[in-house]
Image (cartoon, helix red, strand yellow):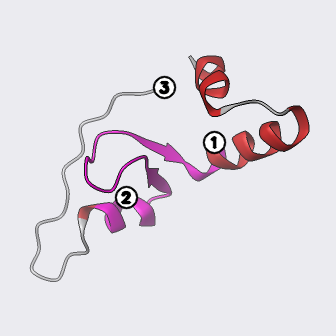
Amino acid sequence: LYFLMIRFCQCTKALSPNMQLFETGLFLVSFTLLKTAFTFVVLDDFLMDNLECGTSAMNYYSKLR
């Protein structure tokens, strides 16, 4: 787990903040509160863990910590 300060591009033709994160490989937990995001690598790993072991999202998150 990492804590990062992110500054979004404010250019006139810039993508929305959630799309800027998406393009960098981050998936937001919520589209209304831009506070927590996961990498696609972590999401793929969770999917495999969930399919193979039945791990819940809460248990997987605890495992990450």
Q: Which residue is mark 1?
A: 42
In the rendered structure, the answer to whether residue 2 lies left or right of residue 46 reads left
Image position, residue 63 (x, y; %): 66, 19
Q: Which residue is mark 3?
A: 1
Which SS class for mark 2? helix
Q: Amino acid at mark 2?
A: Leu
Residue 8, by quadrant, is bottom left
- The residue that appears at 29% across and 40% down in the rendered structure is 35
In the rendered structure, the answer to whether residue 15 lies left or right of residue 65 reads left
Q: How packed is label 3: few (under 14 Cα within 10 Å), some, or many (20 or more)? A: few
Image mark count: 3
Residue 23, by quadrant, is bottom left
Chain-order first, disc 3 or disc 1: 3
- The residue that appears at 42% across and 46% down in the rendered structure is 29
Q: Is residue 23 above or below residue 15?
A: above
In the rendered structure, the answer to whether residue 10 lies left or right of residue 3 reads left
